[in-house]
Image (cartoon, grey):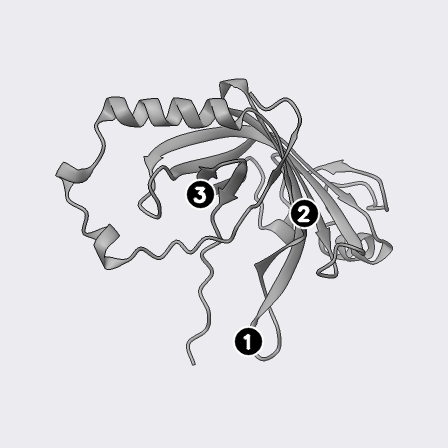
Amino acid sequence: MCNGIKASLFLLLSITMSGAAAAQSASDQPKASGVETDIARIKQAMLGNWESIAPEVRPSAGKSPDGSLKPFYLKRAFKYLPSDRFELEVVNSADPYGAVPLALIKIGGHMLWQGPHPIAAGAQKVDFVADESYEVTPLAAGFADVLNKVAPAGYAPWAVNSPQSIFGKTFVPFGLKEGTSFMEYDLVYLRGDLLFWGARNIRRPRL
């Protein structure tokens, strides 16, 4: 069990499989009992707190005028708990150094383990379901102003350092609809004391 905060890297792993991996025969797949043992071992090793070792950069859904994807800067603090529960805090920043934080996002829910992922030996497919909580806190006046324009319905006026729950509600900036829980289809891979997650699969425009 991880008692202290572990250094972790949420690496943007490519989810494109090589021909060799995709062509793996059924006879090469691990037996069910072995898979269950691997998942149990991974779960035990993951228990505790994990943090990004540096600001991360991910592609956002937004695009620049030239069609290129805009960067999304963030740092994450993740807690894996018994019974497959998780808590995640994400601080989104305007700059790659994390010096200008824009928003704090807190998510709570469950992890659904879906079996081995072909990207690497020991990697597991996991669905993260925010079925307990989802909260947004503006950390900059400019971001609060944006939310007051694009997400005023059903919320108190957005203000800096004032969190509001968006759990089960419509929230246009994140594409959330009322009565639904956010879900992220991802992967989990442990290597030593590093925890790797997968990258979002975002289509780039054809040239």
Specify the amino acid type for callout 1.
Gly
Q: Which residue occupies the foreground of this view, 60 or 198? A: 198
Kindly report the distance in space between the C-alpha atoms of the residues bearing marks 3 and 1: 25 Å
Q: Across the whole image, how many numbered discs are drawn on residues?
A: 3
What SS does tag 1 mark?
loop
Q: Is residue 203 above or below residue 80?
A: below
Quarter of the figure with the N terminus = top right
Q: Is residue 2 above or below residue 90?
A: above
Residue drawn at (38%, 38%), measured in percent from left and top? Answer: 125
- Measured as percent of width and height from the top left, residue 176 is found at 58, 45
Specify the amino acid type for callout 3.
Tyr
Kindly report the distance in space between the C-alpha atoms of the residues bearing marks 2 and 1: 26 Å
Q: Which residue occupies the foreground of this view, 180 or 109? A: 109
Q: Which residue occupies the foreground of this view, 14 or 126? A: 14
**Residue 185: numbered disc:** 3
Residue under numbered circle 2: 75
Residue drawn at (47%, 60%), measured in percent from left and top? Answer: 202
Mark 2 or 1, nearer chain start: 1
Mark 1 surroundings within 10 Å by alpha-carbon count, few (fewer than 14), some (14 through 19), many (20 or more) = few
What SS does tag 2 mark?
strand
Q: Is residue 161 left or right of residue 68?
A: right
Specify the amino acid type for callout 2.
Lys
Q: Is residue 2 above or below residue 117?
A: above
Residue under numbered circle 1: 67
Mark nearest the camera among 3 and 2 is 2
- Measured as percent of width and height from the top left, residue 162 is found at 84, 39
